[in-house]
Image (cartoon, rainbow, N blue to C red):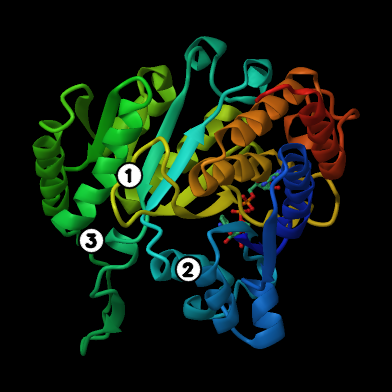
């Protein structure tokens, strides 16, 4: 039986995961699937209960399963603990341990929510892009990474940005493959004007381009990309970049849609090549937002990002494309019908709760005939 680890984590993590599981149940009963769900502790709650943000038995569960559904970790309660044992370090460790090197973040714009976006309607027209971020290398992991004080009592800090051509090639290949299945345009983002790792990145991209002649490859410097993303987002299809640039760009892209509560993500481990169709991968699926301590326990968190992460899980880890499409269509219909959680409500006295949003999506799933 297919297995899924469920890591609720902290803050609104449990709220959005429990709502997404209602949708998950609706899909599995509609299409007659059976999965084994295994709970695991992660983040602040794991620190409180067992003294570490990523207990060994959670790692074992994650190694054993086909997919991981993750809520969020962190919160003010744990802000003062050392970084190595902070809740957020657990998510970095799990990515590294499972070699989840590709992070896929689609940017979804619902026309009826344009008013929520800080961008003008004209800029939002025809935006349909996906950001691929390298997730297990670069600045966040390379050594040396340390701080020290000199004899003259001057403090120093260093991080290292190192990539091998192997790491670069495998993420770029995913980019080319995904672009091939979409509008056939791949934008590779770097700082090849100043950084050696970026020069290698660009060289490898150009070498690979000869294998993907049907895909148009373009290169943009990171600073230009940051500007283009908010001035001309409709111009982009698939954007691929290294870890730190991807971290920044994907958060910037998130505001385009109007709320952090809307966007899903998938982080995949791919050991024998990526194909956008008919293959499955081990993956971790999570909303792009954090634990939102300011709204925890109020029942107002938007569960859509997590529900759409479940759709990505069906697509990438189980090859269940119809099931994924059904969830995405149900979410889109419910949003179109005017159901709003507080973060996307234009009338602040009229919005639905986290659970009500999930139940509306379940009702919609029942009426969708996708087979
Ligand atoms: P955040 O994403 O938690 O919240 C930012 C803002 O967006 C808040 O106002 C919040 O209320 C709102 N928001 C977020 N998700 C929402 C949702 N589903 N529905 C409605 N509103 C939503 O970011 P932050 O405040 O910078 O971080 C809070 C904590 O989360 C920190 O401890 C941070 O380290 C952690 N964090 C964890 C992850 C992760 O687990 N992957 C990611 C980012 C931040």
Across the whole image, how many numbered discs are drawn on residues? 3
Q: In this view, does 32 lie to the left or right of 188?
A: right
Q: Is residue 194 visible in this depiction of the protein? A: no
Q: How far apart are marks 2 and 1 (CA)?
A: 21 Å
Between 341 and 281, the one lying in front of the other is: 281
Disc 1 designates what residue? 274
Q: Is mark 2 on a helix, strand or loop?
A: helix
Location of residue 229 (image quadrant): top left
| Residue annotated with mark 3 | 161
Dot placed on the residue nearer the N-terminal end, 3 or 1: 3
Crowding around mark 1 (Cα neighbors within 10 Å: few <14, some 14 to 19, many 20+) is many
Residue lying at 68% horizontally and 42% vertically, measured from the top left: 307
Foreground residue among 196 and 280: 280
Q: Within 8 Å of ligand 1, the CB of disc 1?
A: no
Task: Say left or right for 293 vs 162.
Answer: right
Which residue occupies the foreground of this view, 92 or 37?
A: 37
Disc 1 element: loop
Tell me residue 168's x, y (percent).
Answer: 21, 51
Report which residue position mark 2 lands on: 94
């Amino acid at each position: 039986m297919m297995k899924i680890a469920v890591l609720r984590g902290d803050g609104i993590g449990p709220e959005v995961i429990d709502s997404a599981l209602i949708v998950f149940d609706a899909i599995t009963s509609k299409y007659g699937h059976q999965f084994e769900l295994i709970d695991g502790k992660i983040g602040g709650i794991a620190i409180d209960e067992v003294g570490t943000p990523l207990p060994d038995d959670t790692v074992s569960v994650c190694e054993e399963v086909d997919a991981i559904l993750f809520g969020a970790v962190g919160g003010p309660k744990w802000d003062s603990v050392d970084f190595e044992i902070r809740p957020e370090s657990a998510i970095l460790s799990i990515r590294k341990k499972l070699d989840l090197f590709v992070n896929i973040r689609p940017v979804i714009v619902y026309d009826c929510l344009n008013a929520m976006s800080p961008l003008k309607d004209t800029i939002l027209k025809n935006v349909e892009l996906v950001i691929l971020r390298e997730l297990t290398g670069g600045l966040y992991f390379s050594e040396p990474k340390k701080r020290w004080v000199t004899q003259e009592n001057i403090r120093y800090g260093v991080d290292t940005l190192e990539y091998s051509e192997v790491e670069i090639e495998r993420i770029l290949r995913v980019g080319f493959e995904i672009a091939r299945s979409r509008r056939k345009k791949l934008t590779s983002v770097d700082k090849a004007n100043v950084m050696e790792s970026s020069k290698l990145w660009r060289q490898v991209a150009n070498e690979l381009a000869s294998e993907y002649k049907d895909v148009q490859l373009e290169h943009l410097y990171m600073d230009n990309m940051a500007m283009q993303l908010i001035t001309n987002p409709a111009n982009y299809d698939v954007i691929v970049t290294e870890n730190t640039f991807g971290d920044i760009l994907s958060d910037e892209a998130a505001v385009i849609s109007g709320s952090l509560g809307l966007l899903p993500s998938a982080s995949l481990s791919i050991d024998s090549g990526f194909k956008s169709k008919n293959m499955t991968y081990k993956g971790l699926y999570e909303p792009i937002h954090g634990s939102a301590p300011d709204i925890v326990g109020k029942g107002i968190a938007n569960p859509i990002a997590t529900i759409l992460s479940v759709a990505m899980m069906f697509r990438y880890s189980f090859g269940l494309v119809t099931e994924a499409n059904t969830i995405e269509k149900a979410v889109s219909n419910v949003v179109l019908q005017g159901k709003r959680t507080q973060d996307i409500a234009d009338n602040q006295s009229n919005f639905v709760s986290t659970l009500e949003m999930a139940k509306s999506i379940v009702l919609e799933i029942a009426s969708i005939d996708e087979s």
